[in-house]
Image (cartoon, rainbow, N blue to C red):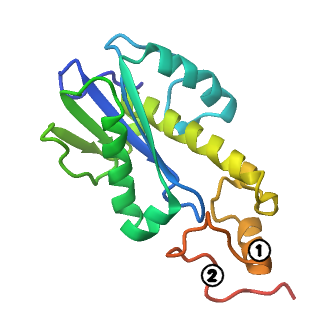
């Protein structure tokens, strides 16, 4: 059962990101302040629920949230910063996109940096423990998936509409065969060091 609040502050924002482990595309973060009495039976960590349920939840979260913000950090910026820093920057910038300044921030994971002196707490697996982080994980994931489907049209060979830029066998095979695009992260290990050939 997801909890509605960690800090006791009414304006508590949950923040999370999507796309850290991908070979291509942006890191996307979202921040959400939910009403204290918010409830939806589908709400859970975005990885635990189907794409169909995420699609149902997104407009509900956007309508019911007291405030929300979403921010995309490009693959070029991921390369420049490193993926951990890019994730923190994405989460911080998603907070700036909100119309309300939160009194407290709860962050999925174990890494964050103080933002505008707002008190915060990192929570490992927070997206499976707190509603606002779960809601943020759903927004981050759906916005990122939408972006990957859009760039899939430019480069259909990589099948981003299905793999969303994650390092699947198929994605790596295409990289091996035809190379990379401007959406790939150059600092990532795009191919295994030793390519095994099927004998």
The quarter of the rendered structure image containing the C terminus is: bottom right
Q: Nearer the viewer, residue 1 or 99?
A: 99
Q: Residues within 10 Å of mark 2 (few under 14, many from 20)?
A: few
User: Is 169 placed left or right of 88 in the picture?
Assistant: right
Asked if residue 47 shows in the view, the reply is no
In this picture, is 120 found above or below 159? above
Instruction: Identify which residue is drawn at 57% across, 44% down.
Output: 144
Judge whether 116 appears above or below 111 on screen: above
The quarter holding residue 186 reads bottom right
Q: Which residue is mark 2?
A: 192
Q: Position of residue 15 (x, y in %)?
A: 36, 38
Mark 2 / mark 1, whichever is N-terminal: 1
The CA span between labels 2 and 1 is: 10 Å
**Residue 149, position as x, y percentages in the image:** 71, 46
Q: Which residue is mark 1?
A: 173
Residue at (24, 21) in percent of width and height: 11
């Amino acid at each position: 059962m997801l909890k509605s609040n960690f800090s006791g502050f009414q304006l508590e924002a949950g923040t999370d990101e999507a796309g850290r482990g991908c070979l291509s595309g942006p890191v996307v973060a979202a921040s959400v302040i939910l009403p204290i009495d918010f409830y939806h039976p589908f709400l859970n960590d975005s990885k635990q629920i189907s794409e169909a349920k995420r699609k149902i939840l997104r407009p509900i979260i956007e309508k019911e949230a007291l405030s929300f913000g979403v921010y995309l950090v490009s693959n070029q910026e991921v390369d420049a910063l490193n993926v951990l820093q890019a994730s923190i920057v994405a989460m911080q910038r998603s907070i700036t996109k909100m119309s309300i300044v939160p009194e407290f921030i709860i962050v999925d994971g174990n890494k964050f940096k103080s933002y505008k002196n707002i008190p915060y707490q990192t929570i490992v697996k927070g997206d499976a423990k707190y509603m606002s982080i779960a809601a943020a994980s759903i927004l981050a994931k759906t916005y990122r998936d939408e972006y990957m489907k859009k760039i899939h049209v430019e480069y259909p060979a990589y099948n981003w509409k299905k793999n969303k830029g994650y390092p699947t066998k198929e994605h790596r095979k295409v990289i091996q065969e035809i190379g990379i695009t401007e959406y790939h992260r150059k600092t990532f290990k795009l191919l295994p060091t030793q390519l095994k050939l099927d004998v």
